[in-house]
Amino acid sequence: MTLQKKILVLADGSERSMQTIDYVNDFIPADKNLRIVLFHVFKGLPKEYETVLKAQNCANELQQLKDWEAGQEKKIQASLEQMKNKLIAGGFPEHQIEIKLHPLKDGVARDIVNEARNGYGAVVLRRRGMGALKSIILGSVAVKLLQTLTFVPILIVGQAPPVKKVLLAMDGSLPSMKAAEFVAATLGGRGGYEVCIFHVILGLGGVDFDLSDDIWIPDQMPENCLDAFKSEVARWFQVVKSKLTAAGFEPEMISEKIVTGAYSRSETIVKEAEAGGYSTIVIGRRELSKVDAFFMGRIGHKVVYGGKNFTVWVV
């Protein structure tokens, strides 16, 4: 995979946005060919005030609203400039950083999606509003982006300190291979990055069998079947390791791990990230490609929500 040398960093003017810039500075390698676009959708005045704007006898109120709007725009612009300065201090050349203060047009999420179609290699956002079930039901911007940004990797930044340790969750599928290629293209050849290629083999108790009869299923897979699974996984791992080393990863910084007999892949991935001191989890987006699969709580969805302290790359 060839990484497009342009990333879209979403900013809302909050302290969380500043923390997102800290992650970019500390984790994404500065590259002389990498462009960063700091993007904010400026809502301006709420639609409810359109009536006031049209009223003939509300000149004073109208001016107050316009002053408020101008003040908000100035505040956001200053925040974006501060973010830009932090990136420059972090080693990114000034001419490679662009600020886009975009006036709201079709909706925050839709405007972001439309911008992301302009040749970006990744979209970076913070986890704001993603911790509670109500954010799924109400349809927060982050959730809408996960549903619709299926054509570009999404980097969802968490609160875990950005140590250079990556847990690359693999299942042998094409999306997970694309995730490995994205890691190789983004971080390869920079030095200091540690990657664990990780796979979870479910115990039979964790498999959702559709059985009409009351048939007993053992919790554990027979050893001969388990060995066959491990052999197949080892083959995937070798392919991924070759991609990483070809991209410039140091072989001694690449590890492999298979966990067997798990009840939940997503929970096992998150627990491994916690136990291993990883800051970033990388998953393929196969389970997030359909809205119905997303709301059914598939693996990728569960990792994004369950691993709320981590940065999750959905590729």
Image (cartoon, helix red, strand yellow):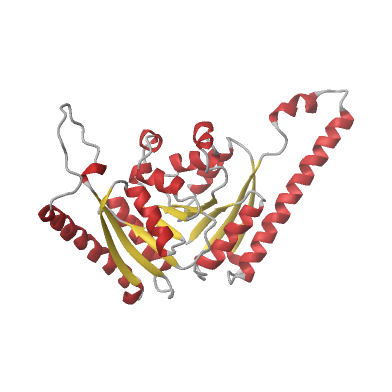
Which corner quadrant of the image does residue 55 belong to? Answer: top right
Which percent across, then down, holds residue 162? 51, 64
Q: Is residue 153 left or right of residue 46?
A: left
- Residue placed at 50% from the left, 68% from the top? 33
Question: Foreground residue, 238 or 165?
Answer: 165
Residue 108 vs 280, above or below: the answer is above
Which percent across, then down, holds residue 311? 48, 56
Question: Foreground residue, 40 or 19?
Answer: 19
Which percent across, then down, holds residue 122? 47, 54
Q: Is residue 314 visible?
A: yes
- Residue placed at 58% from the left, 39% from the top? 108
Residue sitting farthest toward the left: 224
- Residue placed at 57% from the left, 46% from the top? 128
Number of marks drawn: 0
Which corner quadrant of the image does residue 294 belong to? Answer: top left
Image quadrant where one finds the N terminus: bottom left
Q: Is residue 232 left or right of residue 266?
A: left
Residue 129 vs 186, above or below: the answer is above
Which corner quadrant of the image does residue 140 belong to? Answer: top right
- Residue placed at 48% from the left, 55% from the top? 310
Q: Is residue 186 visible?
A: no
Residue 288 vs 161, above or below: the answer is above
Which percent across, then down, holds residue 103? 65, 42
